[in-house]
Structures are given as structure tokens and as C-alpha cells.
Amino acid sequence: MIQIFGDFRDELPSSQEGLTIVFSPTSIPLKQRWRNNGLSADFMADYFATFFPGNKNKTETDPKAEIKSAVSFIANELLENAMKFNDDTSLQSISIRLQMHSDRLVFLATNNINPGAIAKFQTFITHLTTCDPSELYLRQLEKNAEDESESESGLGFLTMMNDYQAKLGWKFETIQKELEPEAIAVTTMVQLAV
């Protein structure tokens, strides 16, 4: 089974420049690695910022600083979501890949999802991709202000869409049919124009 939502592109040209970080669930439980997400995201941001020119004139925007900030935020959000919503019973690794293309950066974060959580997540994705992101962002801020215990707000995805004009897509794929329940991988793709 393969299901695609949003702006997910399987046919991207191969990238000459990329970086992949893989987290194995067998060494340290993934949920204990929260503090490492920021370090990993910042490493990706520092690495890819080297490919963009800096701006010595402090009165203008600095493309290098902007890319670094965007990569750090997006990578951190993707890693946090992948860790938070990973199927704890899965022995599959979580990975994040960042590819540089001539016109965009492409993030690919992959984790296993509990089959019981798929319908709720796909409903959220459908809502996210069919509503006005600015309006949805304001509604979600209001909802979070009313209920501070809200842990599945989607504000990270909405910030990517609103602040960075990123395109988001998801691919759900059965990776092991023999298991009961089946093992399902979800890959979140974020495309950021550069």
C-alpha cells in the first residue's frame, strides 16, 4: 500500500549534495533523544549554509542566515514529529535527509507510524492541505491558548507553510506485510525554494 498526500514528489532528480542522519531505536530509546534533535537540526543548517553566500552589508537581508534559520527550524520540527509519533514497537530507524537542488532544498523525514494512528493523521493532513494555512494558523493559536495541554497542534507544519512558503507532502507505505499489525512508514517531504 502506498498513499500520497499533499505535494509529495517521488520523481525528484537526483541531488549531488545531500546529508542523511539516521537514528536507530536499538541503542537508546528514541524518545530519550529529544535534546539531540536541536543539535542534529543545527548541524544540518550549518552544513547547508556553507553553500550560500553571506551578506557583509548588515542593512540588507543575509541569504545565508535566512537559509540557516529555515533549515534549523524545519529539520528540528521534522525530527521532533518523527520521534514523537514513531511507533514504539517498531525496530525501524528514523531518518532525516536534506537534499540540495538548483532551485530548492528538499527535506525527507521517515519514521514508522502506529497503524491505529494513521486515520487521524491522514484526516489532519487533508485538513492542513485543503484549508487556508494563515487562517488555520490563527485558529490553532487560539485553540492552543484555550487548551495549554494541546500536544498535537500542527503549528510546526503551519509555520513552515506560512513563514517559509514551504510545500509539504506525505507518503504512507507498507514496509512489512507479514507482521500483525503491518509496519507502515510515513515519509514527510518539505520543499523549500531557494
Image (spheres, rainbow, N blue to C red):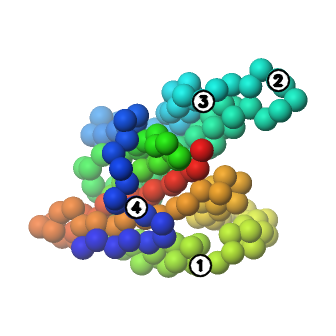
Horizontal relation, residue 60 to residue 115: left or right = right
Q: Earlier in the sequence, mark 4 or mark 2?
A: 4
Give x and y (percent) for residue 107: 47, 48
Horizontal relation, residue 126 to residue 9: left or right = right
Q: Earlier in the sequence, mark 1 or mark 4?
A: 4
- Labelled disc at residue 9: 4
Name the foreground residue: 17 vs 91.
Answer: 17
**Badge 1 amino acid:** Thr
Residue that carries the numbered disc 3 in the rendered image: 52
Residue that carries the numbered disc 2 in the rendered image: 57
Q: Are marks 4 and 2 in contact (CB under 8 Å)?
A: no
Q: Earlier in the sequence, mark 3 or mark 1?
A: 3
User: Relative to 79, is 136 above or below?
Assistant: below
Residue that carries the numbered disc 1 in the rendered image: 130
Q: For numbered disc 2, what is the local secondary structure?
A: loop
Q: Residue at x 37, y 54 (%)?
A: 12
Name the foreground residue: 6 vs 110.
Answer: 6
Give x and y (percent) for residue 77: 56, 49
Q: For numbered disc 1, what is the local secondary structure?
A: helix
Distance (Cα) linking label 2 and label 1: 40 Å
Q: Residue at x 60, y 44 (%)?
A: 194
Q: Residue at x 70, y 60 (%)?
A: 162
Q: Which numbered disc, 2 or 1, marks the residue closer to the eye? A: 2
Q: Are marks 3 and 1 in contact (CB under 8 Å)?
A: no
**Badge 4 amino acid:** Arg
Q: For numbered disc 4, what is the local secondary structure?
A: loop
Q: Residues within 10 Å of mark 4 (few under 14, many from 20)?
A: some
